[in-house]
Amino acid sequence: MKFQYVVGIAPAILMAAWTCPHSVAGFSLTTPSTTTTQQWGLSSSMKKPYQSPTRRSTVVLHEKEQPFSLATLFGGSSSDSSKEGGLRGSTKNLEPHPSVRPHISPLNRLAPNANLDTASDPLPVHPEVKSGVLDNGLPYVILPNKSPPGRFEAHLQVFSGSADELEPQQGIAHLTEHVAYMGSRKRERLFGTGSQTNAYTDFHHTVFYAACPIKTPRGNAPMLPMALDALVDVMEARVETSRLEKERAAVLSEMTMVNTIEYRVECQILSTLHRENRLAKRFPIGKEILINNWQNDDVRTWHRTHYRPDNVLLYLVGDIDPAEAEKVIQDKFGHLTAEKQATEIKIPELKKEASELADAVIAATVKAGQSWHYPPARHDWCVPKGENIALDLSDDIIEYDINLQNKYNLDEDVGFLTTEEVAPGKKIRPHIYRHELLQAFSLHLFAKRPVEAIVDMDSFRRSLARRIALAALQIRLNVGGRSDDPAFTFVEFNQLDSAREGCAVCSLDMTSEPARWKDAICKSVSEIRKLGLYGVTAGEMERYASSLMTDAEQLAAQGDRISHGDQLSYLMETVANGHTFMSPEQSYYMTAAALSSLTLEEVNKAASDLCCHITNIHEGEDTADGVVIAVACSPKNVDEDSPAFCDEETLVKTIYDACQVEVEPEEDIVVPHTLVPEDQVEQAMKENPPVWQGGVFSDGTPGTAADTITRPFVLRRLGNGIRVGVAQNPSESQRGHLRLTAPGGRDAEKRLGFKSGSMAIGARTMQEGGAFGPWTREQVELFCVDHLLMVEINCSEESITIDFVFPTTNVGNVGFGDDVQLGITGTESVLQLVREILLGFHWEEDALGRSKQHFRSSHESLQKNLEGVTTEKIMESMTDMDDRFLSIDVDAVNSVTLEEAKNAVMSQLLPPDLEISMAGDFDVNEVLEMVFKYVGTVPADTNKDYRMNAPQESSVDNFGSVPQLAPGKFIDLELPDSDPRAVSYVSGSAPNMWGYLADGTTVAERVLAADKKASEYDKKRRGHPLFANVALSLLSEIVNRRLFSTVRERKQLTYDANFSFTGFERLMGGWFLVTVTASKEKAQQALEACKETLHSLRKTNQITPDNLESAKRVVLNRHEGELRTTAYWSQQLMSGLQEETVPLKGPLSVTDFHAVVESITPRDLQLALETLGLDDDQLYTAIGKTVTPEGFVEPEEEVVQSPMMGMRRGGALMG
């Protein structure tokens, strides 16, 4: 499991020029692998990674007695330093910095003096990467990269995070991050330049970044100096009272916002996983009582202690000249010194305590022994028997409690876990987390191992062997686990290097229905034991080695087209873990060399090592040393005699018993190399001769010829009625994306009289199934694995979509080098899938069962989610309980039969109504030939027996609209939860994304009607089919910026306020939604502030030219960036271009995009704003709050005196 535990300074809107609204910002603690969407084909594990009850904190201070600062606590001066000493100038006669110690270079393998001795042939280093160290000790890495051209990214990584905080500093790393960047005057100079800035804090580091064009839009001045000025400003941060108060409010709001049940579960997992070290007690969000009371000197002390040249690393990636960049780095950062920083550490006691912590870090942690990127921690390893762990950690006994194993005043009262020795040498550390908001059972089984630096051919071969073994197991779990009656609803086994935790984490993550948790554990553990004991089969070895080779080939083909962001992520993760940073081409050649001689025995040795912590629990086995960590999360208040009941003793026994079950070796499944034999295709060509027809559009674009290749895409129709769009996009080398769209969705479900929920449940049933023709589901899924295909089927309010991601090269190859036997291309295999889905899909009861299980779980989870249930209530009110827009309740789910689900979906898969959009790195003519052959031969009357309307009438005629809104209302909702949270919403009517309102009028019509003095030029501009789409995109950016400025910055009521549209394309009309999180006490104020912001935009503080210009740069930059992705072309740009159901969408929406954006005026947006239902009597508002559950007993708070200063072991506030 690769946890991502990050706190950030701002929501997406905080980006300097406002970044893409799809960006996720703020505090996130996520497990990417736990998506509930099942996918046919290759598991994410094959992808190369970038690679007791709780109570409230004890109250230790009287908040109202006097202004609190750490200086006050320790008896020092409590006054702020109103004038901060400058950090420039001479360092003569300055004392050494108290926290500076000699340490390993954070550049690791890229350090100038790195030890490059290896056990075998060393791996080559990227030939273009440039690294160095300034005289003051500040290291840097520069990587020239051309994708996208004309831009670069600068990231400043500070190697201090929450794990470095002392006891009275919990949360100060995150708060300092906010103050340092949000208070930077030089960062503000990047506003309006098309730049994006943000920052985030984690256990092990704090990172600030700026993504910028290389030249300013106005003046053509170089932007690298400006970006580095902003990062230098972070190193020299001013701590001003006004900024501290703003960011304190933002952080406290963020603390409320992130405290979801998912976050609490992850906190339980991480605190159990790392109970033996300080990570368990140092979460980035910190302690509210401390955050509420810090003063300027507290923040300044943390900053000057940790923001030092020797404790940071600067990364530059982009379209830059390394030699010039080095000069700018020297010029901007060369004057900084640790000694100057030390002069402004204002709290002597913390200065001394930080020095003692620095001594302990050097003596006893993976940070000092392995990588300066790691947190200051030691780990309880669980490794293969006899494995020699040499991490160069001191064995000296130190007095300082570096691992925080003592009890401290601010600790949560969770108790220390006990480790059960279930048999000699077999240890399990269990923990159960129960909560009233949990609906399912989940198990998280861990073993922690040292990170193995991948620096030579031997370590590289071992890493490839691990990836093959992991892929084999994951596919077994996914394919075999989805049986007629699956024990688990989700399962993943993985091992990933985690710089944020300073270790490699081997994890089993599994969820199940509460009553079936024992069966789920038995099934998943047995599969792991099978791999550990018997390894992979010869067929699996061949399959996944071929997949790795294809993966490496695709990456090499990408070359310098890999985006700056992806390059940076890989570079930072590689450097952090001490791996060798190779170019894609080098990685390809090393992969080919390793796989050509990799043996089944090597892979099975890797499998044995990966699974040793599980195989060791079997009686008579002695395969591992160390402890297995088991965390189970389950619903609260379960009777002890219920099958859903789980406690620590039962959990340990179930795991132990599961490890005693005998297992048999895996048997290979015969996997087809092609789904549609050539003779079958030839027969289809004779029986249903395909023909091309020209493209026809509804946006005013002239039709296209049937035999003409056009740019940027080819748009045609097949004789069977299927619309086809094909675009070449080489930006993602050797990859493609296909979307099959069937307009209708839940709107058609209601309009055509199908049972409520049957369309969505049917689409999910297809996702859970996969058998067609002569092939079983298992064979089809393994075919997808062999050909690196991913398939995802979804049903929305207005369509069913089937998305395919595929390689465009030959896949399913056998052998390597000169002996390789090529399979068919991924493009051909994906078109075979499309054909078979339309012609021969098998509907299976077990797939329906898994689909129903998914919807039941989703609905029950929604009822326990504050945001989810509140928005559901708003939607119920606005739509007058219209099923199309609501979740499907359990009774409706249970009532749907297989026949009803099948009939609903198949009624939409009629060739005359379908559209295929394809984009990728392929030859357009070759793709058109394959579409012609595989899709053109599908009979036009396919699935006609499922048609629900007259043959001459298209099933997409008379597309519906959203309901006309009644007068607005306020909704007050309460959700039982032991922790206080609140969320506020403002919603109202809006156009759909092409400007159609629920009454059938358009934005353009209303704007023209309102502007009686419009010129002929204005009328022409506003008559463009893309006008409303662009205007609404720009409006969204401007409203979000205003919300940030008003609700967060000026009123300090929230961390995040967000404005969005529903984004329907076919349905007439839609809604806007403003979401704001705040404390329960401020929820009403935050709601009123959002309304005030919307009203002021209309009257007192209207849209300015500067607002518009900044928004234009954001929209255009986002569009340019997304043009590099095949998904953007197939899912958004081309999807709907030939559909009559989206009348304003056509080729002009792509070709004229820039021109329409540039033509928009503030007057246009002001008038477009009036098409939204913004009057008070039109607004639907809601506040969702948590309330104390019935029977919940609030723990008593305890007030304790502050300790004496000068005490040791872990922090000044020790007990």
Image (spheres, rainbow, N blue to C red):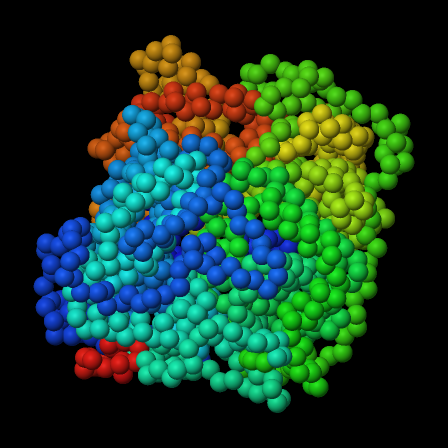
Considering only vertical position in the picture, is 203 above or below 643? above
- Which residue is pictured at 76% across the width and 63% down the height? 600
Q: Position of residue 930 (x, y in %)?
A: 76, 31
- Which residue is pictured at 27% across the width and 67% down the height? 99
Q: Pick the residue in front: 933 or 867.
A: 933
Q: Is residue 965 visible?
A: no
- Which residue is pictured at 40% across the width and 64% down the height? 104
Quarter of the figure that contains the C terminus: bottom left
The part of the image, by quadrant, that contains residue 294 is bottom left
Q: Is residue 109 visible?
A: yes
The part of the image, by quadrant, that contains residue 190 is top left
Q: Position of residue 45 (x, y in %)?
A: 62, 57
Considering only vertical position in the picture, is 460 above or below 992? below
Q: Position of residue 500 (x, y in %)?
A: 44, 62
- Which residue is pictured at 37% across the width and 29% down the height? 1112
Considering only vertical position in the picture, is 78 above or below 1071? below
Q: Position of residue 255 (x, y in %)?
A: 33, 61
Q: Pick the residue in front: 535 or 1071.
A: 535
